[in-house]
Image (tube, coloured by chain):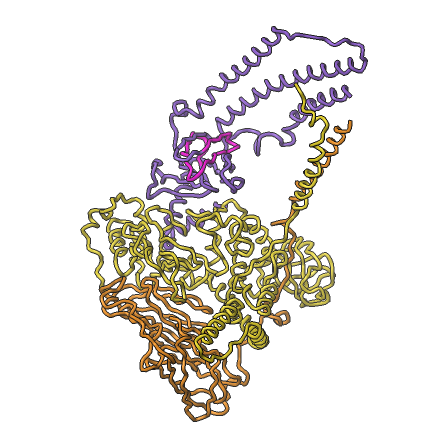
């Protein structure tokens, strides 16, 4: 019986390692893309891989030790000959297996400091940061306000601001920022493919920055339980080149100020509707 | 050991039930299988390519003159019992809104209007046309519906379907004429001096209220019908309907305070004669 | 450690086991798919005498079906999906050329769609699927079916009702929890929402691009689904697949037509309402008793059983004579009205472009706002805060002289309605100048917001008002002073109409 459990526990560990080894082939890895699509995302992925390596080494080592102990113990129990070993602990061992993990953790903590600072501290964020939108989380949608083309985002709404719902457009290839607010309860701005996540807290306006490396369509989901509709609180993030972004901004502005008559506005509305899908 | 086996059997039961509870929640709901059955537009439209809806014709070909000639119904609606005149909705110069216009006159409470014992603003109309009647063509002239000093004039109006109702505004303030029909679509339009036009496409079963969304005391009643055999009793309760087809007819009587006063008032119209009636409405029936 | 001897013997555990078992049994019995969804009925229907109620419910079931067994009634102007066509020519058994009234509809036929024969040798199973489309060539209109003979001229339906089914799935997944299965605005989450979700069954949708007497166009419903309604719990379904959105639009229209049909039939049969009959009889009894006490000799009133029997007999006669015509007329009216909503003539389009958004235009707009020609300030307030004098009045219920219990304005659904606070810059029907123009021109259906276009205000005046309204959120103001000093010195427009 004891030997069975020894094999069982060791086999689980072997299975876990094997699955991790083949995970990428089965798309069991990071969502949608194997690689993060933002600069900070890449750095976070590097950190992830580092920790994965450290943890894997530890996991494999500990499980080998566990398997060995279980097996020899089981053998001894069945044979019934070996005498039980009475021990009062080993001070040296305890010191070793406290200091080594602490050292590893301390290493990890110091190693990731600059990535954390880049994302969280204004002083470490890129100097040239273009705040392109104010994103207001609301039960259960994302309301986004862009400044008009050529203008800066103001903390209060301006007459020529452009509004969208669930549609965040960002230029790729340069660092951009958004101001995050919430209308009611806590939400969380989570773009999995950028590897960025930030809670939206009532009464606060929180800056977030990122630099998208690859144009494309990405998901923005809510990561803080905010009510019965939390599961479907999704928006699309469309990263395009900067010229495309500005072009979209002009089109969205003329669509938003469409008076039903002006032909130029009507044309761009049609174009905007086509590119909408 | 006994307790161990009990424990494990309990565990197995728990696991089985948990599995069943989890799996039973699957499926059903929005994605349940549905069937859709085709229903043809009209029962006989499968055979023909396009079937135009047949006009509802009365029995008897159109164009035949009504057999038996026409007669007139004349009479008076009398209020039975005691009647206390209703105080005006507001006195002169005491209008709750737009006093300089609406306050030019005191606004009478037109829920119950009695003069010389006669009850005014009662709708007398044929609900169902007897078979074989040829309905005279509609009048092409519009009928006028005005509002002056924040009171609709006239208070009760009958018109034909398809006939234009000219909604006028003889006040210098904005009025918003809003009809509340059952069968027709609502008409809700702000009206100034230029006026507006209103047309009812379907006949109503009973009179509908017309209000103003700006001055809440304003109300009038319209009754669009697809025949001319209807009228409203005058200030002193008198009424007359001419060119009625002869025979036994059933009239409906409707008043805003008592709603349906009479479901089927039977009258026998003789050709070429005038039938005079006096209808007494007990005061108890009116709840203004 | 001293162990509790009770635990060791296991006595309490044995007592607990049947309880645990019972609890599990109850939980397990309560689980499962649950009852199937049903369309709710209006009180006007359920309060009828049994014969009338049965008649109305049968008509509704025949014409629209249940949420599981939908009926695609061709008379209703709903795009059910699929096509109706006939056999133009036969190539080989099982392959024929499909004849369509409009060749452009060919793109709607897809392989896998069910075929339903309406006439011909296979039409015995009328109304049920007999075969499927194996392949279809949109250019040559050649249809290969999975079986069955056909003769030239046989009529068939291909995938008819497929969009309605898709719309049903989309609606049940996304909309039912607020709007209810029948679109009655009484879904499970509706009680937690303010403003309440829309009840489609009056056939009226507030924010439309059509004239005030018309129904909502398809585009309006599509726009609301795509953009949501800011300031309410109607979310934006921007990310929904386009074909699902279109299907949802058709399903919502179908539900609105169904609800309107039920309402109109209920209005026609108002005479057969059992609840009001019972209350009338009760009143008659009371009057009789009072008269007897007063010493008079009144006529004994009809008792309730006799009244019900009379009503039932009268309904039987009505059902044979008039009811079929009424059903037809109502259905035709609905079909015509809803069809008209998508007519270009019903669309509100400005005749001239927006007046330039200058200070002068805004000032003109402000004067109009405060004038008695428009009376905007009576509801929306002199500063646009939605606190005009009208919110303090008691308003009468539509069609009666009875007043609402609460002060203030109400909408057609009976909810208390606050006039829009224009200082918030939140425009529920859309924030484009065109949308604001449409609100002013045609009013907002189902609410006290009246229509000013075509009668009271000219196009340039509406644009002036639009410019003013769009500037209100950006004005700095103090409660006592009007928005700008320039406006303070302006007199309001005189009462005399020009």
Q: Nearer the viewer, residue C92 or C349?
A: C349
The colour with which the image depicts chain A is purple
Residue C116, image quadrant: bottom right
Residue A79 percent across, percent down from the top left: 81, 13
Q: Nearer the viewer, residue A148 or B238?
A: B238
Q: Which residues are magenta?
A: A170-199
Q: Nearer the viewer, residue A154 or B154?
A: B154
Q: For this view, does A275 lie left or right of residue A100? A: left
For residue A249: magenta? Answer: no
Vertical order, B28 against C285 (above or below): above
Residue C283 percent across, percent down from the top left: 47, 70
Q: Does any portion of residue C444 appear in the rendered image? A: no
So how many labels did they put on this image?
A: 0
Residue C183 percent across, percent down from the top left: 52, 56
Identify the residue at image location x=51%, y=78%: C300
Vertical order, B95 against A77 (above or below): below
Give the chain ID for the yellow colour: C
Q: For this view, does B186 lie left or right of residue B47? A: left
Residue C42 percent across, percent down from the top left: 53, 61
Identify the residue at image location x=34%, y=68%: B196
For residue A195: magenta? Answer: yes
The colour with which the image depicts chain B is orange
Assign the magenta stretch its main secondary structure.
strand
In the picture as drawn, the residue positioned furthest to the bottom comes out as B272
């Amino acid at each position: 019986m004891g030997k069975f459990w020894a094999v069982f526990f060791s086999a689980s560990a072997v299975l876990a390692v094997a699955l991790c080894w083949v995970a990428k082939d089965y798309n069991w890895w990071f969502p949608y893309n194997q690689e993060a699509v933002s600069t900070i995302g890449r750095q976070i992925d590097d950190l992830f891989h580092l920790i994965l390596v450290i943890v894997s080494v530890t996991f494999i080592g500990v499980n080998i030790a566990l398997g060995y102990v279980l097996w020899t113990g089981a053998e001894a129990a069945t044979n019934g000959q070996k005498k039980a070993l009475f021990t009062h602990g080993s001070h040296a061992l305890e010191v070793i297996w406290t200091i080594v993990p602490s050292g590893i953790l301390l290493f990890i903590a110091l190693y990731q400091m600059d990535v954390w600072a880049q994302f969280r501290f204004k002083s470490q964020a890129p100097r040239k940061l273009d705040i392109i939108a104010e994103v207001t989380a609301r039960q259960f949608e994302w309301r986004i306000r862009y400044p008009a083309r050529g203008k800066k985002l103001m903390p209060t709404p301006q007459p020529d601001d452009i509004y969208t719902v669930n549609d965040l457009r960002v230029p790729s290839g340069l660092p951009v920022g958004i101001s995050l607010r919430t209308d009611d309860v806590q939400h969380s701005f989570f773009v999995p493919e950028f590897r960025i996540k930030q809670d939206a807290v009532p009464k606060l306006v929180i800056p977030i920055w990122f630099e998208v490396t690859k144009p494309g369509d990405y998901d923005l989901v809510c990561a803080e339980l905010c009510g019965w509709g939390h599961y479907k609180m999704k928006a699309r993030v469309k990263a395009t080149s900067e010229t495309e972004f500005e072009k979209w901004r002009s089109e969205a502005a003329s669509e938003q100020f469409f008076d039903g008559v002006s032909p130029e506005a009507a044309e761009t509305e049609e174009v905007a509707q086509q590119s909408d899908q | 050991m006994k307790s161990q086996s009990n424990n494990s059997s309990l565990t197995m039961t728990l696991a089985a039930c948990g599995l069943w509870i989890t799996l039973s929640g699957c499926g059903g709901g929005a994605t349940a299988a549905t069937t859709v059955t085709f229903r043809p537009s009209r029962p006989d439209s499968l055979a023909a390519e396009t079937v135009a809806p047949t006009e509802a014709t009365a029995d008897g070909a159109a164009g035949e003159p009504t057999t038996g000639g026409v007669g007139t119904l004349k009479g008076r609606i009398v209020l039975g019992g005691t009647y206390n005149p209703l105080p005006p909705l507001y006195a002169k110069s005491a209008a709750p809104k737009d006093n300089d216009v609406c306050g030019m006159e005191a606004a009478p409470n037109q829920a119950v209007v009695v003069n010389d014992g006669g009850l005014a603003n009662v709708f007398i109309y044929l609900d169902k046309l007897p078979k074989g009647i040829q309905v005279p063509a509609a009048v092409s002239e519009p009928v006028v519906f005005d509002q002056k000093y924040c009171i609709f004039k006239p208070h009760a109006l009958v018109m034909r379907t398809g006939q234009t109702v000219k909604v006028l505004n003889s006040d210098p303030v904005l009025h918003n004429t809003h009809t509340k029909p059952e069968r027709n679509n609502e008409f809700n339009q702000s009206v100034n001096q230029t006026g507006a036009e209103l047309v009812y496409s379907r006949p109503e079963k009973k009179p509908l209220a017309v209000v103003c969304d700006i001055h809440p005391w304003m109300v009038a009643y319209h009754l669009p019908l697809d025949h001319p055999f209807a009228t409203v009793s005058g200030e002193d309760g008198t009424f007359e309907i001419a060119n009625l087809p002869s025979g036994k007819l059933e009239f409906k009587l409707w008043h805003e305070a008592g709603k349906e006063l009479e479901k089927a008032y039977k009258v026998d119209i003789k050709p070429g004669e005038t039938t005079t009636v006096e209808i007494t409405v007990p005061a108890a029936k009116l709840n203004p | 450690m001293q162990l509790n001897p009770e635990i060791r013997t296991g006595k309490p555990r044995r007592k607990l086991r049947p309880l645990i078992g019972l609890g599990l049994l109850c939980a397990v019995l309560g689980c499962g798919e649950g009852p199937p969804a049903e369309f709710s009925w209006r009180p006007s229907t359920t309060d009828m005498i049994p014969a009338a109620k049965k008649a109305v419910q049968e008509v509704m079931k025949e014409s629209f079906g249940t949420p599981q067994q939908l009926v695609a009634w061709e008379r209703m102007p709903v795009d059910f999906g699929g096509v109706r066509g006939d056999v133009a020519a036969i190539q080989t058994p099982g392959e024929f050329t499909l004849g369509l009234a409009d060749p452009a509809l060919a793109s709607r036929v897809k392989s896998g769609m069910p075929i339903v024969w309406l006439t011909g040798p296979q039409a015995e199973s009328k109304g049920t699927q007999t075969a499927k489309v194996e392949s279809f060539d949109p250019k040559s209109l050649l249809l290969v079916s999975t079986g069955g003979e056909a003769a030239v001229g046989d009529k068939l339906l291909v995938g008819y009702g497929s969009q309605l089914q898709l719309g049903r799935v989309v609606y049940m997944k996304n909309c039912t929890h607020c709007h209810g299965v029948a679109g009655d605005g009484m879904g499970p989450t509706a009680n937690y929402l303010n403003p309440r979700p829309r009840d489609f069954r009056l056939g009226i949708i507030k924010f439309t691009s059509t004239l005030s007497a018309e129904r909502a166009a398809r585009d309006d419903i599509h726009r609301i689904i795509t953009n949501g309604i800011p300031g309410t719990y109607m979310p934006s379904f921007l990310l929904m697949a386009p074909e699902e959105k279109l299907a949802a639009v058709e399903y919502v229209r179908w539900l609105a037509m169904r609800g309107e049909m039920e309402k109109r039939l209920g209005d026609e049969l108002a005479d057969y309402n059992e609840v009001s009959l019972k209350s009338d009889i009760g009143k008659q009894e009371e009057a009789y008793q009072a008269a007897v006490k007063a010493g008079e000799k009144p006529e004994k009133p009809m008792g309730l059983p006799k009244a019900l029997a009379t009503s039932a007999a009268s309904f039987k006669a009505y059902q044979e004579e008039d009811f079929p015509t009424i059903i037809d007329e109502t259905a035709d009216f609905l079909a015509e009205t809803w069809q008209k909503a998508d007519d270009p003539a019903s669309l509100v389009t400005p005749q001239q472009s927006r007046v330039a958004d200058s200070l002068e235009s805004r000032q003109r707009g402000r004067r109009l706002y405060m004038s008695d020609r428009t009376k905007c300030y009576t509801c929306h307030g002199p500063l646009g805060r939605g606190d005009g004098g009208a919110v303090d009045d008691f308003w009468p219920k539509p069609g009666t002289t009875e007043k609402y219990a609460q002060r203030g304005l109400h909408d057609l659904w009976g909810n208390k309605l606050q006039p829009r606070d224009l200082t918030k810059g939140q425009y529920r029907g859309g924030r484009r100048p065109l949308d604001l123009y449409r609100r002013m021109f045609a009013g907002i259906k189902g609410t006290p917001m009246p229509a000013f276009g075509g009668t009271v205000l000219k196009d340039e005046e509406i644009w002036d008002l639009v410019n003013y309204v769009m500037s209100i959120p950006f004005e700095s103001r103090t409660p006592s002073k009007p928005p700008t000093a320039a406006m303070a010195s302006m007199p309001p427009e005189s009462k005399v109409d020009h």
